[in-house]
Image (cartoon, rainbow, N blue to C red):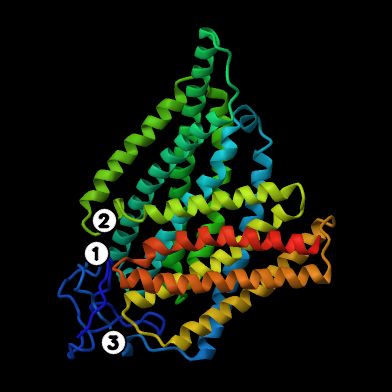
Amino acid sequence: MSLTPIHPGSMVASNNHSSRNSRSDSYDEDEDDDEAVILPDDSSYQQLTIGTPARLSREHYPSKQPRQIVKELTVEVMPALLVSVAGSVLAGYILGQIQDSRAFEAIPALFIMVPVLLNLKSNIELNMSTRLSTLANLGVLDSRAEGIRAMRSNMELLLLQATVVGVSVGLISALLSLTSATTPDDTDGVTFRAAASFLAEAAVLLAAGLGCSVVGSAVIGVLISATVATSNALGIDPDNIGTPIASSLGDMTTLLILAAATGVLGAQVFTPWPLLLSLAFLALGLLLLRVVRANEVMAHHVTEGWGPLLFAAATSSIAGVIVGRCADRFPGMPALVPVVNGIGGNIGTVFASRLSTSLHRRHARASSEHSLVMVILLLINIPIQLGFLAMHRLFDPSLAVTLWFVILYTAATVAHGAALLGIARLACSFLWSRGYDPDDYVNPFITGIGDMLGTILLSLVFVMVM
């Protein structure tokens, strides 16, 4: 029997769960070893080693009819995408408000922090959402005790990763601010004051990065857990709604916390409070590190998955540079970028989450079924994109929306969505074949490439129109 290797730490459901609906029916022990291999463990939340995966037979997860797939995706994914659009619009509005605050005027490095913080924090939350969605579809959340243990372990990991993200973002922002700082006169007094000012601002940046990342991830982690648990209980596939809600509400929550944090910390620049707050979060991070490393199921996550996160941060930063250079020439472009990239990224992560669940189930779905899902998600993308464009035109008459612009805009969003769906499909298959869990690796690639590709395509639309 040929088995596909699975990365250590992947989870499967035991054969003790009660039967479920056709979306995520629990599996029973199969007498035929060629059909299924069930690990003899009482716990459904177990760790697998490479070469010993639980392989589920096709009959335990029957393929759905095309009409059922169309209905499921339309009813579940479209509302989640609409929520994500609203979240992206609100996040942009909040960002516009806080960028005019006193704290941003006093500490310009906060402008550097925001895009990197949003990208890294969003991706670790997306990874948590896909992990929990996979566990829900494998039946782990059917057991109250196992479900609570799974959500608690993932929350601990998320907060540890958020601590690392907060430290990294704070230090990077402080160091990058040096490149734009005015060189002081070559006198001891001025040099000392400049150094003291830099250290004080660095402490504020570190405290703001840690506070926004850890507190924001705690809020979104609870929201993700509640969303997955509730959808699982109601018979809704969490793969269809988890990532759009996590990405949109995550950005909005982070910016609200950042606004509050910078308002408080901005008045404490030359006091010890920012440093003390940073030390408190670092102490919490060390405690979480000890807890996660002691968890045999989650320990491997401590050192894994950081490469894709750095890739996503780099590509999103490049996209930010492109937007900055096009903003003066095409004033209407910056308002469209977050929604174009957000919707495209969301359909890509929804598809990746579904693919990962299918792989964890060892359910070899037909290629035609995956292709149908890709087509439906792409078709769902079009009316939402055009609806947003119409609403934006209604509230911002300065944007010249001609028929030629609509045609090019639609073509760009379709190309963007199709590319990300294709990348999700190829990346999940490739990572799985190499022994990596797509739940931990694929989302940052989708969002990073999506941000850069969507920005380039949208800039080309404006160039061709103008």
Q: What element carries label 1?
A: loop
Provide residue 71's location: percent of width, then percent of height.
56, 84
Instruction: Identify which residue, 178 or 273, lies in the foreground.
Output: 178
Q: Earlier in the sequence, mark 1 or mark 2?
A: 1
Does residue 47 appear to the left or right of 411 in the view shown?
left
Mark number for residue 271?
none
Query: Are the residues flagged by discs 1 and 2 in contact, CB closer than 8 Å?
Result: yes
Task: Determine the residue positioned at 41% across, 81% down.
Answer: 23
Task: Determine the residue positioned at 37% across, 32% down.
Answer: 280
Provide residue 191's location: percent of width, then percent of height.
52, 14
Q: Mark 3 points at which residue?
A: 57
CA–CA distance in space, label 1 to label 3: 21 Å
Query: Are the residues flagged by discs 1 and 3 in contact, CB closer than 8 Å?
Result: no
CA–CA distance in space, label 2 to label 3: 28 Å
- Image quarter where the C terminus lies is bottom right
* Closer to viewer: mark 1 or mark 3: 1
Please indicate, yes or no, whether residue 136 appears anywhere in the rendered image.
Answer: no
Q: Earlier in the sequence, mark 2 or mark 3?
A: 3
Q: Name the residue under label 1.
A: 8
Q: Is mark 3 on a helix, strand or loop?
A: loop
Locate residue 38: give its quadrant. bottom left
Instruction: Identify which residue, 19 or 419, lies in the foreground.
Output: 419
- Image quarter where the N terminus lies is bottom left
Mark number for residue 300?
2
Residue type of the residue flagged with mark 1: Pro
Looking at this rendering, what residue extends furthest in the left direction? 40
